[in-house]
Amino acid sequence: MVASANSTSPISITLRVWRQAGPKAPGKFVDYQSANLNPNMSFLEMLDVVNDDLTLKGEEPIAFAHDCREGICGTCSCTINGKPHGPGKGVATCQVYMRAFRDGDVITVEPFRAEAFPIIKDLVVDRSAFDRIQQAGGFITARAGSAPEANALPVPKPDADLAMDAATCIGCGACVAACKNASAMLFVAAKVGHLGLLPQGQAERDKRVLAMVSTMDAEGFGNCTNQYECSAACPKLISHDFIARMNRDYLGATVRAAFKPESMASGGGA
């Protein structure tokens, strides 16, 4: 039976979890039975319950990442039944509820799979490659000082809206996990796009896109083949249109860098 949105009837599931003691250790799927689960608990709360049972039995609990549990931090990245973040659209793992599953279901949970996201333990992966891409250019170096008057630097509303859409990226890595090539193009495009759309980001616009794309390639992410699994899996529903925008920026920056290498090296933009 399917638990309805208002159902409080407990459900029982079989959790098939990827267990791996460390980065170099062999991994395997292990089954755990969990009964009398409240269908209105979140997926991470269900993992808490399973871990409590394992601890009482003297067994090693399942390692999984979490922080805010509100779909903001992006750390709760799991692949559930083959889909990054599991069933639902526009939600992170922590926003998936057990009512999305049937009583008696076998639920397969594994970490995000990508060469650039090495497994640390069980369901936890190292996504510091994203941090290094961000550090390569996802910032402005102009002194911001105190908060300026709101209307001191006018920004057209369409640009402001697009910038905010891009800035909602939480860096969870679902786009990478969903892509057959493990491409990080949607993540990088969102970070490049939100600064590239605002006046404050124009001075380093060319240098930013060249540096971030170069770092993305160096980290071992794959190429984009425009099948858009990334935007379908994104918990913030960021559009793949940002990838096209970044490609245009990258092409323009590459041409300008060929004629102004000194300017580009010193951080000059378009």
Image (tube, grey):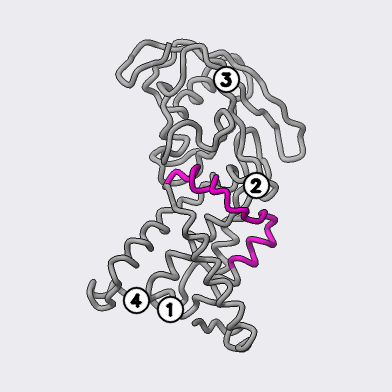
Tell me if label 4 and label 3 are in contact, CB under 8 Å.
Answer: no
Q: Amino acid at mark 4?
A: Gly
In front: label 1 or label 2: 2
Of the numbered discs 4 and 2, the one sitting upstream in the chain is: 2
Label 4 SS: loop
Judge whether 46 appears above or below 115 on screen.
Answer: above
In front: label 1 or label 3: 3
Crowdedness of circle 2 by 10 Å Cα count: few (<14), some, many (20+)? many
Q: CA distance from mark 1 to mark 3?
A: 50 Å
**Residue 235 occupies which quadrant of the picture?**
top left
Q: Which residue is mark 1?
A: 142
| Residue 90 pos. (x, y %) | 41, 41
Judge whether 6 appears above or below 186 on screen.
Answer: above
Q: CA distance from mark 4 to mark 1?
A: 9 Å
| Residue 265 pos. (x, y %) | 61, 83
Judge whether 161 appears above or below 172 on screen.
Answer: below
Q: Amino acid at mark 2?
A: Phe
Tell me if label 1 and label 2 are in contact, CB under 8 Å.
Answer: no
Q: Which residue is mark 2?
A: 117
Which of the pair 64/268 is nearer the observer?
268
Crowdedness of circle 4 by 10 Å Cα count: few (<14), some, many (20+)? few
Q: Amino acid at mark 3?
A: Leu
Q: Amino acid at mark 1?
A: Ala
- Residue range (magenta): 212-236
User: Which numbered tag is attached to residue 145?
Assistant: 4
